[in-house]
Image (spheres, rainbow, N blue to C red):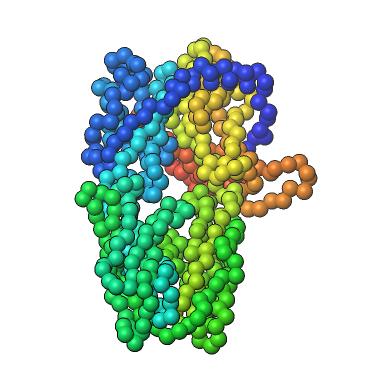
Amino acid sequence: METLERIQPNRQVMAFILMVFLSQARAEPMRYSVMEETESGSFVAHLTKDLGLGIGELAARSARVVSDDDKQRLQLDRQTGDLLLREKLDREELCGPVEPCVLLFQVFLETPVQFFEGELSIQDVNDHSPVFPTREMLLKIPENSQPGTLFPLKLAQDLDVGSNGLQKYTLSPNSHFHVVTRIHSEGKKYADLVQDKALDREEQSEFSLTLTALDGGSPPKSGTMTVQILIIDVNDNAPEFVHTPYEVQVLENSPLGSPVLRVSARDIDAGNFGSVSYSLFQASDEIKQTFSINEVTGEIRLTKKLDFEQIKSYHVEIEAIDGGGLSGKGSVVIYVVDVNDNVPELTITSLTNSVPENAPETVVSVFRIRDRDSGDNGKMICSIPDDLPFLLKPTFKNFYTLVTESPLDRESQAEYNITITVTDLGGPFPGHLVDVSGAGTLSHSYQYDVCLRGGSGTGEFKFLKPIFPNLLIEDTEREIQDNPNCRNSFVFS
């Protein structure tokens, strides 16, 4: 890999001028809305009109729709100028609990290069009912519990959002308890059982109540759970956590089985009533798969690989139960610390196979770079060698355009090998290096070969494995040799 040289000042000025010239995107993006579960092929918008273009201009300028996540959920009819759904959209699958649910896309016009930003808002429909994690829960309450005491119940989950999401809880009629709906700081709705009058185990030793969760749809959907209440003999004190909430940071590359934190709860009762066991409380499937807790020691360990780019923090609720059935709640906030574990990615959007000699400045390729890390680990520098008659110009966000710097002479040189180098500003990858020179942040560069997905007429490219310094990638070289569609050079005639 050739050493990166500092980009000449005059090239920076020219890049800035071209970026101003080409970035003819609107100050505000185009905004559209569609209901989830709308059938594929449905009409979204008429882009020819919205972009202020003439009839047939989208086809003439090779317009296409590019999505931020590389998944083509939209399609453009260049002849009619209509933007259509390529597939049926599921808001819960795309955005989960995030509201509003917005898909970002760009309309790319190739000749000349021009970009327009767009946003598609996916509106929720009431297609899910509230669901409790279990059909029944057991609650043990001491007979000397005082009226007004609150007992947390298991919460229901509704994948819908807004007014279609979970709104309230109700409890079947009885003489001793009612339920109140409370809103957590994160916006989740919890049910607390409230004791209305004194209990007498000798008079009534148990209750069987039905807890109902209702959403705000019209008509509302609901889910139920049976709450079985056992009245037990006196146990004066419930466990209390020494600290809550706990906060801890864990590197995303921590190995499985690594200890995360040890929680501790105290119960001043003696004997079995003072013995405490620990468990995860109302944990989601993701938390159950990622962490485990020792019921005796309270030690939390890692059971699934962390990925900062997927989940940046976890809120884990811990329950401590003593031998008499009383419980205390504590919370642990686990922050995932990013490490530089993702290499920069390069995606070819447009590539010209040949360029006529003596042609004025010509666009050879349009491509996009991306790094899934965050902070300095995700910041990138893109460059080509300075001894080539080409310029690399930032075009739009992370898009770059490779253009000829001046007319080419085939008799002088008929073929050029152009290496595009992408460098992130984070720590080294792979492996671990220590900077002892005081020169600053260490970084690595990554070179990419590109390969046609299909025949020479498809125009669709993928990037092969990055070539690390001093590291031979045999699989990449073998694919280049075996596949006649693989290209690592550009030919000019």
**160 w.r.t. 278: above or below:** above
**484 w.r.t. 309: above or below:** above
Furthest residue toward left:
219
* Residue 249 x %, y %: 60, 58
The N terminus is located in which quarter? top right
Q: Is residue 43 left or right of residue 162?
A: left
Instruction: Give whichever of 23, 184 is nearer the camera.
Output: 184
Q: Residue at x 41, y 72 (%)?
A: 147
**106 w.r.t. 217: above or below:** above
Q: Residue at x 48, y 42 (%)?
A: 464
Instruction: Give whichever of 131, 382 is nearer the camera.
Output: 131
Q: Residue at x 56, y 62 (%)?
A: 245
Instruction: Give whichever of 56, 82 is nearer the camera.
Output: 82
* Residue 138 x %, y %: 36, 75
* Residue 203 visible in the current orientation: yes
Instruction: Give whichever of 217, 426 is nearer the camera.
Output: 217
Task: Answer with the quarter of the image where residue 192 lies.
Answer: bottom left
* Residue 444 x %, y %: 63, 42
